[in-house]
Amino acid sequence: MVGSIMVVGGGIAGMQASLDLADSGFRVYLVDKAPTIGGVMAQLDKTFPTLDCSMCIMAPKLVATGRHHNIHLLTNAVITNVEGTPGNFTVTVTMKPRYVNAEKCTGCGLCAQYCPVEAVNEYDERLTLRRGIYVDYPQAVPLVYAIDREKCIGCGLCENICQAEAIEYHQTPEEEQVNVGAIILAAGFDEFEPDTKKEYGYGRFKNVVTATEFERILSASGPFAGHVVRPSDGEVPGRIAFLQCVGSRDENSNKYCSAVCCMYATKEAIIAKEHNPDLEATIFFMDMRTYGKGFEQFYKRAQSEYGLRYTRSRVPCIEADPETQNLLLTYETEDGTITKEEFDMVVLSVGLEPPKSNQELSSIFGVPLNEYGFLDWKIFEPLKAKDGIYACGAFSGPKDIPDTVAQASGAAAMASGVVSGERGTLVEEKVYPEELDVAEQPPRIGVFVCWCGINIGGIVNVPEVMEYASTLPNVVFVDQNLYTCSQDTQEKIKQAVEEHSLNRVVVASCTPRTHEPLFQSTIREAGLNPYLFEMTNIRDQCSWVHMHTPEEATEKAKDLVRMAVAKSNLLEPLKSSSVEVTQSGLVIGGGIAGMTAALGLAQQGFTVHLVEKEDHLGGLLRDIRYTVSGEDPQEYLTGLEQSLRDHPNVTIHTQAVVEKVEGYVGNFTTTLSSGEEINHGICVIAVGGQEHKPTSYLYGEDKRVITQLEFEDMLSKGVKAKTVVMINCVESRDDTKEYCSRVCCSEAVKNALQLREQNPDATIYILYRDMRTYAFREQYYDKAREAGVVFMRYDPETKPRLEKKDKSLVLYAHDSALDLDFELHPDLVVLSTGVSPYDNSALSQMLKVPLDRDGFFLEAHMKLRPVDFATDGVFMAGLAHSPKFIDETISQAFGTVARACTIVSKERIETEPIIAEVDEELCCGCQVCIPMCPYNARELDEEEKIVKVNEVLCKGCGSCVAACPSKAAQQRHFRDSQLSSMIEAFVRR
Amino acid sequence: MTFSPRIVGFMCNWCSYAGADLAGISRIKYAPNLRIIRVLCSGRVDPYVVLTAFQKGADGVLVAGCHPGDCHYISGNYQAEKKMKATWKILSKAGIDQERLGLEWISAAEGQRFADVVNSFTQLITELGPLQADPQKIASAKEETADFRIRWLVGREKDLLEEGNVFGEPVEEAVFETLLDDVVSAQYIRNSILTVLKEQSMSAKELAETLEIPSHVVVEHLIHLRRGQKVHMVEGHPIRYEVSAW
């Protein structure tokens, strides 16, 4: 068994899996075929449904992945061979040459500035040009340039220019054998290439772009700096059409639904509208599949607030006006009207396809692919490719970012489950010398000014800045370096600290966002506390932006150095404290989510308490009789329960509810209704949800009107009814429940197919608003149509009406597609009523975690932290989060296991050193800070009537500090005095 | 010589500071007057620190954070907005043009926008000219940013408006604004009185003349200050007031 894991693919899925693994005691090899990690998310402008800036939310993960000492990046690399068995694989990785020495390259970018060769920029979707030596995007990790060998003419300029001597033309492919215990495949997806659909003229018509191209156009860092203009003439388009299902739900390309396009098109149209409020945006679609958490509300807002026009039609072809380059769309609406309409620009919502490398990956790893070329997985094992090899993200089918991230954590849990016994055996901890006690010494400051090749030194007069620094109070040593970040400079800094007894170090170079940790580590090696370091940015925020005014740039650099020195005088050594962790978990809710999470944690070697309010386990899954793909849920449930009961780490508490929760991450104490007290380090909320019980359509009044789950139960015993009508979206997507319950369309299809099998003569109607059989579920919708199930679309304005006439049921329906009225005489009416949350308010208050407006639990971040809460140490999975399928619930449950392991795998957790503190003499107990803190890190000491900071929970944003009416709060490292010293240093001159 | 303003910038680490880096990486040129002080969150920018900048001689202060909804710390930027809104009120009392304090949302992907914001802000401050406010007024305003009542109200504003008050009633924005305006006005006068009295003791009438406000207003506030033991009366003719030691 080997305590390391390989992750293949460095997109958001690969990064999340790597971070979870590395943070819970495993060495990770992260392999990406591109020179940089980041994947598709790095190209996105904003993300739905919160319209977060994609790069802003992703950059911290990029940096964390790149910097993690237990994550080894193997970029520009492909896997060529795999041998061995679960627990001990040997993987051969071939690294293509990048012709740049990764150790030496500082990422300064000078080479690219001078390189005479231009090539299309793939990151910008071929809308811009990059150089022959390049990085994909400015925030790239690793920030190491690479030569595009296909374009490079070998002129030799970059070698002459590079002052770091990083260019190595002689590099050849390198092979590395890596020994790992388990493997995670996160290879992502490719985009459907619309050139094959000649009718849309992509490639011929300049103003027909793909959605990803449009994403780059929208992006502030894209080709037009975020101005929405069309490629043909740079004019602002007044009318944009979005065409859905290009390369999805299509006999001629991909039959499956790509699951994300309805939402991304809506998002892109909204952003475009925000850029240009006069824009007329039209989305041409077949079914609007806004099925996820918060999606339906987003779709509604798109119409009511932004005035997007949604037209239900599949546009057959596009013509262009050669004069204006405008585009002519001829389409037929449902009522049969043929309309011809002109647009300035067309965006093709292209689908997601398996990556072209999938066949190769499949044969190398010996994992099965499905008929579409994605990983073939099973409903109860959604993350497993085969023993020891797991998968997440779009590699196993189209999905959005939150589902991908939950899966990534889930795959991390499964992979580490294989080698959990080896936890901690291969991780490296950096050992630093004991810290010198300098707290009482007067400041002795060393200042290092960086040339960054000529990036700074070519504009800013570095020697002058250095000379100037030496005149500042308490500065006892100054130096200038060609590259302050290079390995030899680190040695020089350590030497200077020693020789000159420096107790503060200031570096004037690039951005602290990427380089501060490096220098902090250097001074730690020299025995200084890492917080006795201050950095100022004289490159990104000075020389690079004032190139044409070198004198002013030099003056600014002096100011910046003076400000940094001023603050450094007031720096204090900071220590993180650490608290002991109770290395066990509490899982609330004994359905499939809770059972999976509990077993997962137990298999990782931690004790788990599973609390269930009923007298039996199983939750809602007990009501599921069969799956659409033929598995037996009850058999699976029995097996799972047996595994739980057999596992020595698991204690099951049935007929028990949580009465009281005290403590915080690492140290919770929960009291159950039985009076029993449980100590635990983390908590998983898996309380589930329930089928909504309707009040309409004679439900409860007539026995022939039932819900889908009741029908499923009936089907398991045999149904004789001849005419069955199912009505979807009953008390969903309306005033009762605004959200879409995600599962009902597929549940209706499943039950319809089951009935058809039992009773081939039955007449089955499904009355629906949009069929939301997303991703591979589309195949069952196809199958149901082929099997003669009648699908009839209704609009919310003309809902079906059910009446009882002389004991018979009569259903009046208006088919909105055909614009015809029907009168049906069903023997049975089945209502798809959706999923409702339980009343979660008590639990929400006890654990101090929020609910969304629908009553489900609200995660820390919709996109990147789908199973976390803002409150550390509390996680969630399953229907408690939002309606979802069994496989999605299982993925999330495993996701909580990996997230929990980042805490319970540690004996102690360290607190963040830069946190808020309270001067107890000054605090008057007004408590304004308590609700202001998003992390519940402040609480009232009831006895002393003052507020105290929970050092474990505080993340150090400082919002409370700037609000405290008594000025009792301060933020370490950003004290008022420290900020004021910088202000004073600047304006003083 | 043309006026070159001194501008202090407070940029949050996760979005705006990164946006400034991106402007650099993209080599987008902008005015060289800004000096950035990095903070972890725009919510950390204390109105008191902003006034310190003006007091020490900054001509403009630019605060930038993540776009609404993007905050790395969930809600810090909303808090920043409330804090800066109150600071604007306080600045105008001190006769400082509100526009000298800028608040902008700049994402990590908006290098060009960062440069544009800096340029237009620099131009604005250049047009406004050097800050030539009365030091005594700035001192009063700075005192005001440290005032308990104002800081408490600003700290509660978001929750009060969004979630209602302790009686479970909604609080209307207009009502809150009026209250805050009143508190800021009253407190500003009191701080002005205290600032003047710190220099020398004065009678109510002398204070009214110095501060250019009606004497009955001065009297009302003096009563309040005396009851709060901030000032005390010195017997004699006329009755003068001086600042209490503690």
Image (cartoon, rainbow, N blue to C red):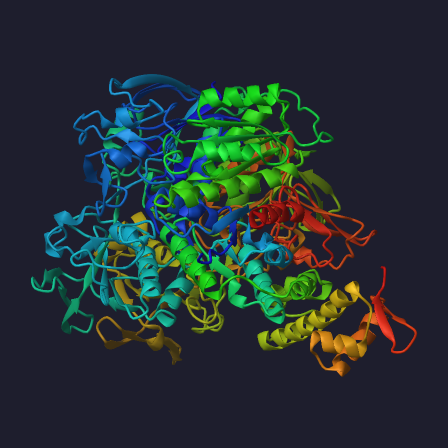
Nearest the eye: A193 or A119: A119
Farthest residue to the right: give it: B235
Can residue B194 be seen in the rendering of this structure? yes
Nearest the eye: A54 or A594: A54
Q: Position of residue B69 (x, y in %)?
A: 48, 57
Q: Is residue A804 left or right of residue A530?
A: left
Q: Is residue A67 left or right of residue A667?
A: left
Q: Position of residue A754 (x, y in %)?
A: 33, 53
Farthest residue to the front: give it: B1
What residue sits 58% from the left and 74% below the top? B173
Can residue A718 be seen in the rendering of this structure? no
**Relative to A828, residue B105 above or below:** above
What residue sits 88% from the left and 76% below the top? B239
Q: Is residue B98 left or right of residue A164?
A: right
Nearest the eye: A579 or A450: A450
What residue sits 36% from the left and 73% below the top? A796
**Relative to A737, residue A84 above or below:** above
Nearest the eye: A642 or A467: A467
What residue sits 43% from the left and 45% below the top? A552
Q: Position of residue A656 (x, y in %)?
A: 67, 48
